[in-house]
């Protein structure tokens, strides 16, 4: 491992030096000025779009409901066939779960805490399952390829192989232990959506009756009209 650590340390030092030179550059300063102008002058407005003002004036809770439903559908789509997803597909699902969590956290002040907080807790538990998968994907992306560190150093290459193999094995073990292990200790639902079943298995929140489908368990999502603030 020391050979790889030395290579990565030198690479990080070079990148930091490059960043110190780039940040004071005129292009960066011009970008910051353009960004401030865009925000202050409401640069997202389209003069030809006469309905834009009306849409922007809509209650934020309506936008929240649509945004959360959109993110939930994305997660549900990527979670189909959860038990058979490969590494790349699980990585994509992890990213969608992260987007859903950020959206729920952003809009949660609009909804009762007793509904938003339990759902966020479930999301965090599920994201923990995917944490090692992300570590494995990052390690593989950073340590392989034409510009991978230590390409000409056999000792560093051996260390890279060990890191990639160990991170992938840890990810696969965690997936099997936390998902398959939990599922094997609880009764399976009838006709359930893969992701929702997974969420409920992890959180011990399995319904006593009814199908565990996305539509029937939409109460997990803080977007019902009855829960909108006055």
Image (spheres, rainbow, N blue to C red):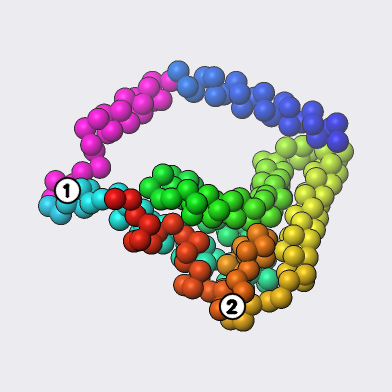
Q: Is residue 162 left or right of residue 211?
A: right
Residue count near mark 2 (Cα–Cα under 10 Å), binned few <14, some 14–19, many ≥20: few
* Position in image of residue 78 (x %, y %): 55, 66
Q: Is residue 188 above or below residue 23?
A: below
Relative to 193, 34 lies left or right = left
Residue 103 visible: no
- Does residue 27 lie above or below 129 as drawn? above
Task: Please provide percent x and percent y for residue 55.
Answer: 21, 52
In the rendered view of the protein, which quadrant contains the N terminus? top right
Q: What secondary structure is marked by label 1? A: helix
Q: Tell me the SS state at disc 2.
A: loop
**Residue for point 60% across, 20% down:** 17
- The reply, left or right, for residue 190 in relation to residue 139 is left
Instruction: Name the residue: 58% across, 81% down.
Output: 191
Q: Nearer the viewer, mark 1 or mark 2?
A: 2
How many residues crowd mark 1 within 10 Å: few (<14), some (14–19), many (20+)? few
Quadrant in which residue 19 is drawn = top right
Q: Where does label 2 land, which residue?
A: 209
Range drawn in magenta: 25-48
Residue 32 on the magenta span: yes
Image coordinates for residue 192, horizontal then vertical, percent: 58, 76
**Spot occupied by residue 198 in the image (x, y as percentages of width and height):** 64, 66
Q: Residue at x 58, y 60 (%)?
A: 93
Front residue of 18 and 84: 84
Tell which residue pokes out farthest to the bottom in this image: 190
Residue 208 vs 119, above or below: the answer is below
Task: Give the label on residue 53, or none.
Answer: 1
């Amino acid at each position: 491992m020391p050979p790889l650590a030395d290579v990565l340390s030198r690479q990080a030092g070079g990148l930091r030096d490059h960043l110190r030179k780039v940040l004071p550059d005129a292009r960066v300063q011009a970008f910051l000025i353009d960004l401030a102008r865009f925000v202050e002058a409401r640069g997202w407005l389209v003069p030809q779009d006469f309905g834009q003002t009306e849409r922007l004036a809509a209650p934020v809770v309506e936008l929240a409901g649509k945004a959360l439903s959109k993110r939930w559908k994305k997660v549900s789509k990527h979670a189909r066939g959860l038990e058979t997803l490969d590494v790349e597909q699980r990585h994509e699902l992890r990213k969608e779960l992260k987007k859903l969590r950020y959206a729920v956290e952003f809009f949660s002040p609009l909804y009762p805490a007793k509904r938003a907080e339990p759902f966020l807790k479930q999301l965090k538990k599920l994201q923990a399952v995917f944490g090692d998968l992300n570590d494995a994907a990052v390690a593989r992306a950073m340590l392989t390829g034409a510009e991978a560190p230590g390409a000409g150093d056999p000792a560093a290459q051996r260390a890279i192989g060990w890191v990639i193999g160990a991170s992938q094995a840890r990810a696969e073990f965690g997936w099997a232990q936390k998902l398959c292990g939990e599922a094997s200790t609880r009764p399976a639902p009838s006709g359930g959506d893969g992701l929702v079943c997974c969420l409920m298995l992890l959180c011990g929140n399995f319904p006593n009756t009814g199908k565990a489908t996305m539509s029937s368990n939409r109460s997990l999502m803080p977007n019902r009209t009855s829960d909108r603030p006055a």
